[in-house]
Structures are given as C-alpha cells and as structure tokens.
Amino acid sequence: MTGTAARADDVWKVYGTEEARVVALRGVSADFARGKFTAIMGPSGSGKSTLMHCLAGLDTVTRGSVHIGGTEVTGLSDKALTRLRRDRVGFIFQQFNLLPTLTAAENIRLPLDIAGKKPDPQWWDTVIGTVGLGDRLDHRPSQLSGGQQQRVACARALMSRPDVIFADEPTGNLDSKAGAEILSFLRSSVMEHGQTIVMVTHDPVAASYTDRVVFLADGSIVSELENPTPETVLEAMKAGEVLV
Amino acid sequence: MLRATLKSLLSRKLRLVLSGLAVVLGVMFVAGAFVTTDTLGRTFDKLFAEGYSQTDVAVMAKPKVAVSEMEGEQVLTPLPASLVDQVAAVPGVAKATGVISDDGARVIGSDGKVVTSYGPPRIGMNWVGTDDLMQMRQGRGPTADNEIAVNEAVAKAAGIKVGDRVGVLTQLPKQTFTLVGVWGYTNDRDSIGGVQEVAFTTAQAQKSMLKQPGVFTQITVQTSSGQEPSLVRDQIAARLGTGYDVKTGEQLAADSSAQFKDALGFFNNILLGFAGVALFVGTFLILNTFSIIVAQRTRELALMRALGAGRRQVIGSVLVEALVIGVIAAVLGLGAGVGVGALLVTLFGSMSGGLDPAPVGVPLAAILSSLIVGILVTVVAAVLPAVRASRISPIAAMQDVATPDRPLTKVTVTGGVIGAAGAALLGVGLYGSGSLWLILAGVLVAFVGVALLTPLISKPVVAGLGRLFSWSVPGRLGRLNSGRNPRRTAITAAALMVGIALVTGVTVVIGSVKQSVAATAEDTVKAEIVIGGDQNGPRPPVFDDAVLAGTARIPGVRAVAGIWNEQVLIDGERSYVTATDDLAKLTEAFGGTSLPALEDDQIAVSTEQATDHGWATGTVVKVQMPRGGEHSYTIVTTYDEEKVPGSIMLPMAATREFGITQPSFGFVRLADGATVAQVLPQVKALVADSPEVNATDRSSFINQQVGTFDTVITMVQVLLGLAILIAVLGVINTLALSVLERTRELGLLRAVGLGRAQTMRMITVEAVVISVFGALLGVVVGSGLGAAVVRALKGEGITQLVLPWSQMGLYLVLAAIVGVLAAVLPSIKAARLNVLAAIAHD
C-alpha cells in the first residue's frame, strides 16, 4: 500500500476576471500518500477548501493538473467525473450529509446502489461494526443525533473502498466528545484498513489525529508537519502565521 | 416590512411567474367571455341596425305561439294583403309594402347538396326591388313565378350563376327555378351578416313560403319626409287595433339584437363556468405555491419576527406578495382575454359565413371582473399560508428546521366532514330537489373534501404507484420524494383531480345517456328503414310527404309513418308536439302495442303527460297552432312514452297549421320476407328530390341519433383541457420549488455519484407519480360523481351506466406523459446544478 492516492501539480485556481479577479490557489503541488491521513489547514480564505474541491473533482482547476489514483481528473467530462466520484472518491461534509428520505442503511448503500453494485457482506459488517450503528440502521436521519449522522456519513464514504476520502470539517458541527469519536474512527480506518483520507480542518486537535498536516496561506502551501500533536500544530501555525 | 416583502418577491421571479400563470389563465377565460359577448353584441347591434335601416315602421301579426331565439324558430303569422292598403292610408305613411320574409328557403347547390347554414337564417322573400343597401350585381329581379334572384352569398355557396336552373326547398317540396339575378350589398358585401336570401315573385313567395295566397309576413312602411317614425307607428297601431306588433325600425333592430344577446348570455355563462373551474383549480395551485414559499422562507420570516415584526405584519407580508401577484396576473389575464375574445369573435364570424364583427372592445365588466376575480382568488388562496407563516416562532431563525411533518389528523377529519357535507348536498340535489345549484355546490364542496382527504390517501397510493418505478435507484429516490410531503403532493394532485374528475364525470353521464338512448332505440324502433337527415341549419331537415305515400306503394313494405314536430300552445302552455299521418302504422313501425289511427279532432298523450297535466281519456284540450287557429282535441288514448317518438301525438290534419308542413322522419316497417337490401334502394330513389334527408337502415339511424353525444363529450374535454393545463402548471411549480428546496440534497447526490441523466430520471419519476396519482383520484372521483348522477336519472329513462374504461385508461396514460413533460424544466434545472454551489447552498 504505497504510492500516491491523490496528487496536485502546480494547481492554480482563479475566480472572476479583470478587477474582480481572485486567486484562490497559486501553483499548489502536493502528494497525498496512499494509506495516510492528511489534514489541510489554513485560515479562512487560504484556499484549503478550494484545494480539496479541486482534488475531489468537484471544482475545475484554472491551470495545472490533479490526479486521483492513476487517473488525471483535469479535463474529465461531467459523466466521467460523476463516475469518478461515485466509484473512487468518498465524501464527508460538515453537515447535510444524508438524504432525509432514506434510512441510515440506505444512505450508507447509496453510492453502491447508484452504481448498481452490491455491498460486500463482510466489509459491510466490518464498517457497520466499527461505526457502531447496528441498532440504528433503520432510522431516518431526523431520528439520529448529529454525531450519529456523521458516523453514517463516514460509513457511506468507506463502504465503496474509495481511493481517497475527502472530509470537509467533518467535526465542525459536533461537540468535542462526538467529534473525538468520529476522528478516532477515521484514524482507525486508516490504520486498520489502509484507507486514504484528506481532511480540511481548522482545529489543531482534529489535525493531531492525522499523519501529516499541510498548511496553506494565501493559496500556497507554506509548511508541512509530520506526526502532529495539538501542540506542534499550534506552534507551526504560530510560526507560519497561519493562525485561524 | 413592505420593502422587504417586495425585495423577496423580486428575488423569486420564477415562483411569481408560475403561480401567477394559473391566475392569468383563469382570468383570461373570464375576460375572454366578456369581451366576446360584448363584441358580438355590438356586432349584432350594428347588423340589425343596418338590416332595418331601410324600414321606418314595420307591421307584423302577433305570433300565435311565441318562441324565442333560444327555444326554436318563431313561426310568423300571415297578414292579409288588404291590410297593406289600410296601413298605406294612415297619415304620415309615404309607402307601405307587403313583404314576405321567412326562414326556410334552402337552395340546392350545383353539387346536389343543400347549402348549409350555421346560424344565419336562409330567408325566402318576395322581390320588391332594391333599396339603398342592395346593389344588383348581375341580371334582374324575378318577374315570372319560375324565376328567382339570390344574394351573392347564396350564389357563391351554391356555385350557381345567372341562367342556371336551381332547385329550392321551401314549404313545398323541391321546385326548380331559373336564376335571373344576383344582388349584393354596399361596401362590396355579399350579404348582411351571412344571411342567405332567395327572392321569388310575390305570388310564388306566398305559395312557397307560406302556402297561402294573398298574405304577407310583414308590412314595411316608409314615412313621409319629416314624419317621426314613432308617431306614425302609434297612428298605425291605433288604426289596426290589437293583434299586431307595430314597431319602428330602431325598435325591431333592438329587439332582434336583444334576442341574440340572450342567446349570447347563455354562451357567456358556459365560458364563465369553465373559467370558474379553471380558477378553482388555480386556487389549489396558488395555495400550494404560497405554502411552499412560506415553508422556504421560514428562517427569513422567523428572523423578521425576532427583529420585532408582529404577527399581523408577517400575515401582511405574505398577503402583499399575493396581492402583487394577483394584480399582475389579473392585468395579464385581461390582456390575454382580449386576445382570446378577438379570436373567438373572428372564429364565430367566419363560421357563420360573412358576419362582419364589430371592432373588439374591452367592456368595463371585463376589466372589473378580471381584476376582482384575479386578486380575490390569489389573496384568498394565500390566507391560509399567511396565517401559518404568522405562527412561525422567532426561535425558528436559530434552528435548522426541515419542513416539519405535521400530523394529518386535523386535515383528514376536516376533509371527512366537508366531503360528507358535499355528498349530502349532492344527494339532496340529485334525489330531492333536483336543483342544479345544489348539485354544483355539492360537487364543489365534495372536491374540497376529497382534496383535504388527499394527503391521507396519498400515503398508500403514492407508495403503491411508486413501486412501479422502484427498480432503479433514481426511481426509488423519486418515489420517496413524492411521498415525503403528503400535503404538497396531495394539493398538486388534487388540482389535476378536479379537471380529470369533471371530464370523467361528464363522460360517464353523457356516455350513459347515449347508451340508454341507443338501448331504448334498439328496443323500440322496429322500423327497418328510417328516412331522416342531419341538422344542416336552424331548421330541422324535412322531406316531401309524397315520399311517404310512394314508399307505402313499394312491394315488401308493411307500414310507413311519418312524423312532424312543432311547438304549440296546449291550454295556453307551450308544448312540443308530434304529428303523424297514421298513429296505428307508427306504433307498428315501433313495434309497441297498437294504437288507433287518430281522427282529425283526436289527440293521444303519453301516460306521463296525462299524469302531469291531470288528463284522462275523454279530456278535451285546446291547441293553438302556430299558423291558423285554436282547435279542440279529445284525448282518445294514453300510451307508454317509450313506445312512440313523442309524448303528445296529433293527427296529420294538424300539420297544415304547423310552421313547417313537411315531415322530418319517416319510419318504414317491412313485410315478412322482404329485405332491407331490396327495399332501401327504392326508398332512396324516392328521397332523391329531398336532398336534406337520406334513407338509412335501422342501425345507421340509431348511430346517427346518438352521434351528437360524442360531439358534446369532445367539446367538454376541450374546454376542461384548460383546467388540466393549469394543473400541469401546478406540477411544474411544485417540482421547481422542490428542486430549489432540495438544492443541497441534489448537490449531495451528485457528489456521491448520481449522474445527470439519473438526476433527471429521479425528478421525472416524482412528477409522474404525482400526476398519475392525481389522474387516478380524478378518474375514481369522476366515476363516482357520474355514477351518482346516472343513478339519480334512472327515473328519466337513463338505465345504463357506462364507465368509459378506455378513456379513463387514456387519462392515466396522458397523466404519465404530462408528468414527464412537467418534469422537463425542473429536471434540467436540477441536473445543471453546480455541485459545489449546491452543497454550499443555504
């Protein structure tokens, strides 16, 4: 399980034209290793979310290229992008992760259902077991707590064993206990199942669950940190003046 | 607050357009009705004013049986020629002319067919020279009894020219004349208002049109110069005494126009009825739109509440939004209505053949009714959502409220109560008083009741329907979406239900009536051959009564009987009567119990008529004929109404004083062993000179008799199509708003890999489920309503209940197609959503 799960090569992202021009990313290049948990940090407007969206094929890049697994994402048609997202990428958003009309189990199965695939029963049991939702699978999102909803979202992202899971502030809306549960869960899926996860966060504690932190400021990578702890993350943020 | 409302309104242009469109269409019908009636009314004013412009005063005999334009053809009472001199002698009269002018001169065209007329009369007149309006185009007026002149409209329609030998049907059987002249009117017109005119010599006109020498239908008077027509009129009236109508040309024009306007009023009411249906459906649509808008604006409204806006201000804010939409829609609807009116007037003009429509005008009634109806409907429909909006608590601004699923108990109970009330009204209307208003109110209230019950019904039915599509993920998602907000689905479907229920109900009733009539005819008409024709003008098609005698002589014919129809006064009350040449043979042709032939002073009545009027065998009734006098008839027998075509039967002698003295149907019963194939060609040969009618076998006759019902069904379907169109707008609206509301959800689905085509399919399934659900409800409710009406009509001889299965199936299929079409725009919108923007959507 080595190699690159996702890669950005000299990625530029420019919004608007002429005077209203905003440069969100200025030639960002980064590799996200397979089987690693990476955090992208940076203050508001640093481009961290834009980078994640470009990596995930949700947004197009102005210049440069993005790869997921061996596939170049740049220039793919909407159809191909849809397939890519369905089969090879997992998503966890900050909120509104679930369809209110579907039960937890149906939400988890949704990407597989869309692709017309059946979940591998063993993997299903493993994922469900780890997220600890056994007795709540038939509930609808409105009957679940915020933490439980995020766990369903995590299970959904994991179920198709994507090349990479992108998590956008997955604990942003949760209390610290529920947040810690989610982070531990993400951490263990990296450790035990070799899942690749890229997470955008502004929380040093959340970042400390990862293997590596990439700091962004003004659309450029300013520093990196391996095996972070909350303290080292904070220090790095201070040093790089990337305090959020 | 007002500024906030208007800003919020402008930011929702799509919503505004869609919900407004329903009102626009409804108001369009209202305004269209008024504009059409007004313009046609002025057209008739102008037409008759011109038609009577050459007449200062006219004298006519009072009609013996007064019949209005709506009820049939007025039979004119003849005036003796001696009266002309009497009138001429009145001071102030410069010239008095005896004129014959009566409907019923049917020209046979060069193709051998009778020239038809859809509305304007086919006048037979005596030639009294041209007046200021008339212009001779070719030839001259008739001077010999075998000559005629016609107006250009007739010449063109019949394809005839001066010198041709032309067949004309009048009160007499076909006669052939030489066409010696063609005239037109000033300003290059072929006729005035499409009227067909045939001019004979006075003697021939008396013979052909009135079957009586030395009489006229009216005397037209030109007053001496400087004489006021109304004064001359009074003098003539004083001289002649009672029994005559003496009127000025202006009066006549106004009277004739008023009669037509009465008929137009009926037309107006039909249009307004359909406008009512359209607006009723539109109310559902607006109610739904505002409910959704309020649901979506929950946060915004809660924020306003938190910032100190009062409940009344919130209600006001929603109502102002409705008011703005109502005003805009009413104005647009008025504009569209003027267009529709202009279109209808043009259509009417071209159909009636040469009616020159007055310029389209917008009467005050159209403006007022459009504005009032448009605004009222919109605001009333918005009241409920507005009140709901005012109940939003300020705390909702801080919470993340999904559309809450409120329990359906209250709405279901209310629906049950209202539905029961509607059923009760309907029951009383149908079985008790028979009042049309009660029935209409019952139907309306029942619709509201069913609409309120719809959310409850929608749960199992929508789930069931949705299963049809559940084989794919988009299908399943669509199904779940259509079931997630039962109220919204229900109201959207209910709007469609109303239109389809009405169409289905009407189809059930008319279909059942048709089937019953056909069954009765099958049962009673034993005549193997029937002589009769299709209506080709205001008067019924008739034929030479010599055909009856001729047919009787054909070998293999056992019995022949003809019937004549007329309206007479029986003991002062206007009644439809039938006369026959031989009641005994007529009953034979109908295979009922034999009735005796009638003597000239005998009458036969059905048992129903006898019961209604308290008649019995031996009763003497006084019958006033449209021409001629009042005669006494003795009732000699009563009979079962279904056995003979007519409920009051007069002897043939009476037909001499009928308005139309020729028979309209002949029934031929064959002797044993004779075949239709043998006899029919010989009968056909006999009717060759009566081109208005044809001889057909029994089954063609029955089909011909019930054929009109299909036309009525088609007309109702077309008119109710508008209500269905509005309902379709409702489906589009609901979907568009749902797509907007679920933007983030759609973004999520796209993010986890739902393709564009799949997204579109998901929306389409939702639309199809909603519309098929609505159609299903409509078909069920409509069948129920129709069956109830048919059941209530059992006493009237409507014994068959026909459920139009194939049509109902068609409605369901159409509803599915409608769903697919309604989903086009919303699904494209959904598929084009920018995934990122959708996820970030707030």
Image (cartoon, rainbow, N blue to C red):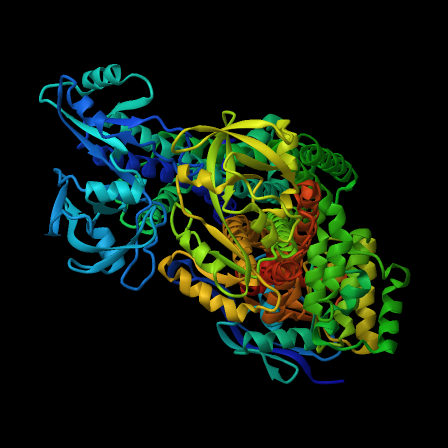
- Quarter of the image with the N terminus of chain A in it: bottom right
* Image quadrant in which you'd find residue B827: bottom right
Along the viewing direction, whichever of B203 and B476 lies nearer the viewer: B203
Q: Can residue B815 be spotted in the picture?
A: yes
Along the viewing direction, whichever of B165 and B594 lies nearer the viewer: B594
Q: Position of residue B452 (x, y in %)?
A: 70, 41
Along the viewing direction, whichever of B467 and B113 lies nearer the viewer: B113
Q: Residue at x 14, y 45 (%)?
A: B187
Q: Is residue B370 left or right of residue B611?
A: left
Q: Position of residue B751 (x, y in %)?
A: 64, 67
Q: Is residue B173 left or right of residue A211?
A: left
Q: Residue at x 15, y 20 (%)?
A: B89
Above or below — where is B804 with respect to B431? below
Above or below — where is A3 with respect to A79? below
Total label count?
A: 0
Along the viewing direction, whichever of A98 and B132 lies nearer the viewer: B132
- Quarter of the image with the C terminus of chain A in it: bottom right
Q: Position of residue B161 (x, y in %)?
A: 18, 59
Q: Residue at x 42, y 34 (%)?
A: B265
Q: Is residue B691 left or right of residue B409?
A: left
Q: Can residue B444 be spotted in the picture?
A: no
Above or below — where is B302 with respect to A195? above
Above or below — where is B78 with respect to B536? above
Q: Position of residue B764 (x, y in %)?
A: 61, 63
